[in-house]
Image (cartoon, rainbow, N blue to C red):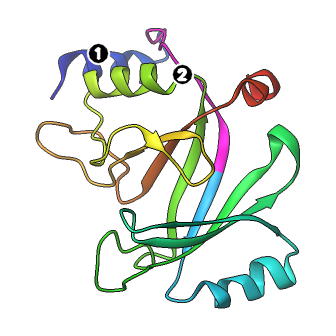
Amino acid sequence: MNPSHDAATTAGAAGGEAPRKPFRILGIQQIAIGGPDKARLRRLWVDVLDLQIKSTFVSERENVDEDVCALGRGPHAVEVDLMQPLDADKKPAVHATPLNHVGLWVDDLPAAVAWMTAHGVRFAPGGIRKGASGHDICFIHPKASDEFPIAGEGVLIELVQAPPEVVAALG
């Protein structure tokens, strides 16, 4: 366990002042929903709930074919990704858990990753890279390890670099 993480957690939990972090989480950026056939997902999210498809993203590396939808407008919009695997037998298995991941806007992604890594947070392989919407992203791993004892506890969490207009609106 990382002693600096334990001290920060204990201080924050006890009501003391936690150390200032070099980043801020601004809000929910996206919710990603997976299934074996995204056409079935569109029946509810697009046809019934009236979300608009903004774009489509296909990536062999990520094993995904997704429709990128929007709920809301402007910097307050939440992206809803409807995903199916390109190959159901390959990983990542984007359809294996229906709620695939939650994305959070962050004002300084490199600072967040550096600070979280130093404080025991486990990240999924791949590092910071461009995501489906063109923003820099990375993922907090759903499972902890001995080296990195803090993780999503079963939930994959995407950190997304917020563009200036989102930082201004939500920050």
Q: In terms of secondary structure, where does tag 1 sit?
A: helix
Quadrant for residue 156, please give it: bottom left
Judging from the image, what secondary structure is the residue with disc 2 in?
loop
Residue 2 seen from this side? yes
Q: Is residue 154 above or below residue 39?
A: above
Residue 91 coordinates in the image, percent (x, y):
29, 72
Q: Tell me where residue 24 appears, x and y as whole percent.
A: 58, 23
Query: How many neighbours does mark 2 have within 10 angstroms: few (below 14), some (14-19), or many (20 or more)?
Result: some
User: What amino acid type should be assigned to the residue bearing mark 1?
Assistant: Ala
Residue identifier under label 2: 108
Provide the residue span drawn in magenta.
Answer: 17-29
Residue 116 placed where, x, y %?
Answer: 35, 27
Residue 96 x %, y %: 40, 79
Q: How many marks?
A: 2
Residue at 43% from the left image edge and 80% from the top image edge: 86
**Mark 2 or 1, nearer chain start:** 1
On the rendered image, what quadrant is the C terminus found in?
top right
**Residue under the point 73% across and 23% down:** 164
Dot 2 amino acid type: Asp
Using the image, determine if residue 62 lies above or below residue 162. below
**Residue 71 in the figure: left or right of residue 100:** right
In the depicted view, which residue is nearer to us: 66 or 108?
A: 66
Choose top left, top right, bottom left or bottom right for residue 162.
top right
Above/below status of 104 relative to 69: above
**Quadrant showing the N terminus:** top left
Q: In the image, is 49 to the left or to the right of 89? A: right
Q: Return the residue at label 1.
A: 7
